[in-house]
């Protein structure tokens, strides 16, 4: 009985937090977005370099995927735009405590651009559709965001960078081996963990004029 009371209280509190997030003043939304940008910068320092690729293993994508859930469809993306813009301006919070425009035009710059797209995508669906907040739906959204929206621009820029720096055109298999394959298992772990956390923290009832609010049963919050 006590466990049920605790769960109900938690559901109520998380609903109030997300409702509060939607009603914040502009300056407070900017502050929250900057906070998530800082979290992305911290996760970027979880870095494991690999000898055969200029792209290291980092923890950034976990923060990126959670950003969309926590801040919603616009501010999740804005948080990553802040991360990109402030880092490009010189703040050393990219992987390996690096910063400046050289990172943006380097082998990993495309992935960072993809962060914005991924956070916007996840935030849009989890903010506007209650049915998108089940574990399987969130997992699917995050899989697409990670392996298409982040890897897409990441591989495109990596291919261009390899061509310009190495002076030769790499095959698709070679680019995949350098820019995707070494990271699949780690990314799957981060995506599953992010989806599980998102499932726990996001309310299952309308808090922001959701499109399907009238079609969803008004049950658990």
Image: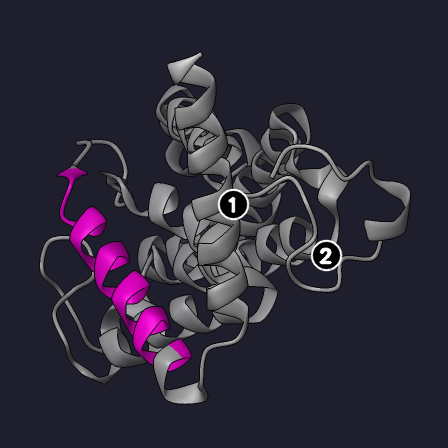
* Residue at the image point whose x is 52% and y is 45% from the top: 151
Residue farthest to the front? 1
Asked whether disc 2 touches disc 1, contact meaning CB atoms under 8 Å apart, the reply is: no
Secondary structure of the residue carrying numbered label 2: helix
The answer to which of 126 and 143 lies nearer the viewer is 126
x and y percentages locating residue 218 in the rendered image: 76, 39
Query: Which label was assigned to residue 128?
Result: 2
Q: Secondary structure at mark 1?
A: helix
Quarter holding the N terminus is: top left
**Coloring basis for residues:** one colour
Q: Position of residue 179 (x, y in %)?
A: 41, 38
Residue where numbered disc 1 is placed = 151
Work out whether 76 lies above or below 3.
below
Q: Residue at x 44, y 85 (%)?
A: 25
On screen, residue 177 versus residue 91, left or right, reads right
What range is drawn magenta here? 29-47
* Residue nearer the viewer, 207 or 107: 207
């Amino acid at each position: 009985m006590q466990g049920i009371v605790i769960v109900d209280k938690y559901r109520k509190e998380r609903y109030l937090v997300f409702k509060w997030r939607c009603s914040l003043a502009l300056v407070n939304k900017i502050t929250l977005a900057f906070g998530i940008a800082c979290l992305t910068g911290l996760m970027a320092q979880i870095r494991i370099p690999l000898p055969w690729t200029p792209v290291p293993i980092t923890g950034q994508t976990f923060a990126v995927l959670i950003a969309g859930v926590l801040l919603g469809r616009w501010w999740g993306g804005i948080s990553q735009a802040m991360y990109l813009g402030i880092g490009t301006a010189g703040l050393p919070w990219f992987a390996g405590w690096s910063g400046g425009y050289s990172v943006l035009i380097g082998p990993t710059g495309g992935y960072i651009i993809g962060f914005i797209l991924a956070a916007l995508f996840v935030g849009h669906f989890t903010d506007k559709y209650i049915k998108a907040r089940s574990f399987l739906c969130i997992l699917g959204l995050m899989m697409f965001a990670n392996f298409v929206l982040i890897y897409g621009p990441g591989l495109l820029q990596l291919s261009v960078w390899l061509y310009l720096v190495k002076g030769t055109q790499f095959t698709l298999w070679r680019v995949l081996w350098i820019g995707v394959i070494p990271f699949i298992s780690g990314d799957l772990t981060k995506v599953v963990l992010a989806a599980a956390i998102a499932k726990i923290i996001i309310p299952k009832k309308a808090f922001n004029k959701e499109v399907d609010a009238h079609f969803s049963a008004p049950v658990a919050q």
